[in-house]
Image (cartoon, grey):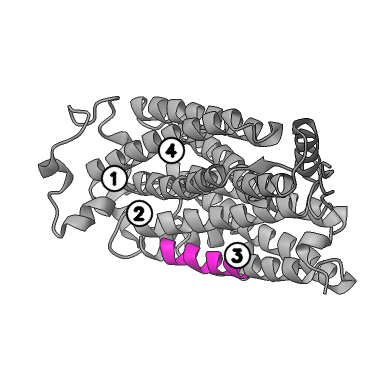
Amino acid sequence: MIELASHKPPRAVRWWLATIAVLIAIMVLVGGATRLTESGLSIVEWKPVTGTLPPLNDAQWREAFEGYQTIPQYRELNAGMNLAEFKTIFWWEWSHRLLGRVIGIAYLLPFLWFLWRGALSTELKRRLWVIFALGALQGAVGWWMVASGLTQRVEVSQLRLATHLVLALLIYAAIVWTLRRVSERQSVVASPRLKITSLMLLALTFVQLYLGALVAGLRAGRVYNTWPEIDGALVPSAARLFFEAPWWRNLFDNTLTVQFEHRMGAYALLTLAVVHAVDAVRSRAGPAAAGGAIWLAIAVTLQAALGIQTLLHQVPIVLGLAHQAMAIVVLTLVILQAERLAAGQSSRRVDKAVGSHECAPDERAHHRAEIENGGHGASVPLPTLRN
């Protein structure tokens, strides 16, 4: 049976995956705009099929507006809103949902075509079915999020918002990782330490994205708008960070604690990215690995600076969306770096292969270079034995 590692799919498959990744990135940004404009609760029903069409006449618009007027957000925050103002927030939410449907169709139909044509290996089919299942789950999670703000709250639950965003970015990450696996690549030789730090960066990036979503859901970026101090100190008092009971609720519900977590996560991510870049350069892992690490460190630095400016200006829409867009850039770079190193050879295996036979120093260097540049599945010539 042909597997993913040994079967390169047609170029059309790679273009299809790249297109889906771009559409998901756009959808995340539209979702960010929907949140920043307080538009996410403007559609109070989930109609996966009939909801594709917006209101088409005055009666339908009045019916949609009357539905919005029944929820707490309208009564407590937007009482007196007119129909024209309602249409503005409606179009944001409708566009977000429509884009989700478009992505579903753009994924499923070509996928079925490629399956019918036999263009996909067994492992690749498995990966793509899992991604499809996650996409279907995402639609249900989206409505689960919206439903949290329709009865007793004036906004959606920050926990459900974070789940919705992280699941979207997990799908995005799976597609980008898969796309890299079926594309041409430059072979790298990396130490186990370098591979581990790249995976740590990937995990920490997702933690930071989750914390950022909590900040967004609590509107925590619009309070404590100073830096580097927060609430008058570099580290707020424990009494302020953990005043809710039980204590762990503060990690998700306390605006000060959540913003502090997000800041500390940013510092940790920046530090690890710089350490990883220095290690990649000093270990001579190759231009691809070193370049990827350097670009990642630069992107994380820019994202930290942009986050500070977004905070100091109390999250205007332009800066808020720029911060979210830069987060996608950071995620993309960390996925590429982690996949690049995970797919590369281990420097220990290379040293073992080269050193398993006694050879002259110049021959040893020559054979190491052959191994490093051999690519996946390339045969490794044995060193010339000395007499």
- Region rendered in magenta: 133-146
- State the CA–CA distance, disc 1 to disc 4: 16 Å
> Which of marks 4 and 3 precedes in the sequence?
3
* Residue designated by label 1: 258
Which residue is depicted at the point 46% across and 27% down? 306
Q: Is residue 120 visible?
A: yes
The answer to whether residue 195 is left or right of residue 285 is left
Which residue is depicted at the point 44% across and 25% down? 305
Name the disc covering residue 64, or none: none
> Which of marks 4 and 1 precedes in the sequence?
1
Q: Secondary structure at mark 2?
A: helix
- State the CA–CA distance, disc 3 to disc 4: 28 Å
Q: Are marks 2 and 1 in contact (CB under 8 Å)?
A: yes
User: Which of labels 2 and 1 is toward the front?
Assistant: 1
Q: Are marks 3 and 4 in contact (CB under 8 Å)?
A: no
Residue type of the residue flagged with mark 2: Gln
Q: Are marks 1 and 4 in contact (CB under 8 Å)?
A: no
Residue type of the residue flagged with mark 1: Val
Q: Secondary structure at mark 4?
A: helix
- State the CA–CA distance, disc 3 to disc 2: 21 Å
Prevailing secondary structure of the magenta residues: helix
* Residue designated by label 3: 135
- State the CA–CA distance, disc 2 to disc 1: 11 Å
**Front in this rendered view, residue 71 or 297:** 297
Residue type of the residue flagged with mark 4: Leu
> Which of marks 4 and 2 precedes in the sequence?
2
- State the CA–CA distance, disc 3 to disc 1: 28 Å
* Residue designated by label 4: 269
Residue at the far left in the pictured view:
239
Which residue is depicted at the point 44% across and 46% down? 204
Quadrant position of the C terminus in the picture: top right
* Residue designated by label 2: 158
